[in-house]
Image (cartoon, rainbow, N blue to C red):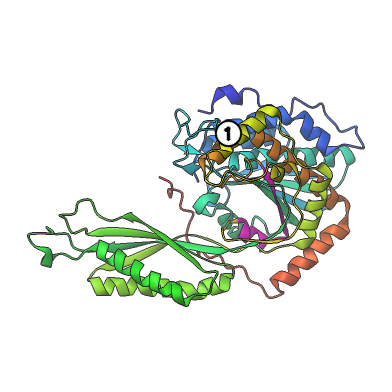
Amino acid sequence: MLRKTFAAAICFAAIVPACSQATDFDVTADINIRAEATNNLARTIWATAELGYQETETTALMQQILADEGFTIQKAVADIPTAFVARYRQGSAGGPVIGILAEMDALPGFSQDAVPKKTAFAGLTAGHACGHHLFGAGSISAAIAVKRWLVATGTKGEIRLYGTPAEEGGSGKVYMVRAGLFSDIDVVLHWHPSDTNSADIPTNNANRSAKFRFNGVATHAAASPEKGRSALDGVEAMNMMINMLREHTPDRTRIHYVITSGGSAPNVVPDFAEVYYYVRHPDPDYLRELWPRIEKAAEGAAVGTGTNVDWEIIHGNLSLLPNTALQVLLHEEMTKLGGLQYTAEERKFAEQIQKTMPDGGAAMQRATTIKSQEEFFTAGSTDVGDVSWSAPTGSINTATWVPGTSAHSWQAVAAGGTSIGHKGMDLASKTLANAAVRLFSDVQLLNAARTEFDERRGVNYVYEPLLGDRQPPLDYRK
């Protein structure tokens, strides 16, 4: 069950009276008024920490809040039980359609309390080490504020909230893109927790992953080794060849793996072994060219060790297609709002967290100011990439973590459960909501974003997901 300590205080619709009579509705003020409810929603999701495609309680809560606000909910989209699209249309037709992404999944192995030392949170083995509890709650708050603005001003258009599960290795958004859920949208906005406040012009790596499964012949490793064929030998031979392959790939290629199964006892030749690979490059087309070489290495390893191999594509994400027009808009709105201010208590918490970091963290100014805008490349990957090739997409980061914190760390979980995380989420909500209002109000902004999108993508572009036609791996975290 959701932790009632936090869930009981969540009520969005009842906090603010109906605003249909207003003509100068302020989305920033609306978000301020609902801040406590948004914080409680984030804290509830944080204390539930459900893994990818298992976010059943989280998605139910998110959907209920939006339904209570008047959104129409399309449940279990793209053959994913926890994915949904919430829509609110003002006017029977016409006007822009703007979407906001809302993630929700946690990471395994990150149980952590909201304290500045490594301390497990009772009852949990997972944790929001990437801050998706803040992502989901903050995006919902922004979508509600925009909906209320549409009603108050009588502006025609549609605001959508996309509930997107399993970003962490599950590529939930890719299946939603493949199902056509972004085919009729004008602009998509999203944000992500970070240790800085920025609206840089982002690019990153495309990514494809697969599990390579070797099957051999088991036998007694000492008494009759000649009768065995080691599946682990197959895995190790493949890994050796892939490590030699690295020399003959472009600099930005990233290949990493983990042996997920290698046998149970050293005196038994293992008849099954599995290795899980991620392969990344900024250019999705080059990644498609490289991938057959990975498969050939697996086949060669199987031939050389007398084993058999097959593989399963687990996920695939395109790289981000940047949109400068949207990034400039988001930077302007974030700059108007300003950075964050820590209380004395928050600063003390931050300083204690930084003492646990090998490099001592970073200057507090990263959280309290807005970073200058620049083009920015990150070696990581995200399923937002596929969304960005389907519709003009803009993104921001806000400081929900203590400066110097790495994503996927216990320090990120800890800060994400405190007012430090909530303040960064609040800035994100307001930035997205104000940017959406400007997009609804200024057709030239929309046209500029669309023109740039068409030019970057190319007129003959055809969407081809890197994960192919596989079905969502709903049990990949089980």
Q: In the rendered structure, does residue 219 fall within the stretch colored magenta?
A: no
Examine the rendering and report whether any part of residue 246 can be seen: yes
For the residue pair 335 and 460, the one nearer the viewer reads as 335
Examine the rendering and report whether any part of residue 12 can be seen: no
Residue at (76%, 57%) from the top-left corner? 373
Secondary-structure class at tag 1: helix
Query: Which residue, as the protein is rendered here, is positioned at the far right?
Result: 23
Amino acid at the residue labelled 1: Gln
For the residue pair 3 and 391, the one nearer the viewer reads as 3
The residue that label 1 is drawn on is 352
Q: Quadrant of residue 232?
A: bottom left
Numbered disc total? 1
Rendered position, 444 above or below 284: above
Callout 1 crowding tier (Cα within 10 Å): few <14, some 14–19, many ≥20: some
Q: Is residue 363 left or right of residue 258?
A: right
Residue 89 on image: x %, y % = 78, 45
For the residue pair 186 and 131, the one nearer the viewer reads as 131
Q: Is residue 308 left or right of residue 91?
A: left
Residue 44 on image: x %, y % = 58, 30
Q: Is residue 468 left or right of residue 37?
A: left
Rendered position, 391 above or below 416: below
Residue at (43%, 48%) from the top-left corner? 475
For the residue pair 20 and 42, the one nearer the viewer reads as 42
Residue 173 on image: x %, y % = 59, 54
Which residues lie in the magenta part? 384-399
Point out the image quarter for the C terminus. Answer: top left
Rendered position, 52 above or below 182: above
Query: Which residue, as the protein is rendered here, is positioned at the far left?
Result: 223
Residue at (83%, 63%) from the top-left corner? 448
Residue 143 on image: x %, y % = 74, 42
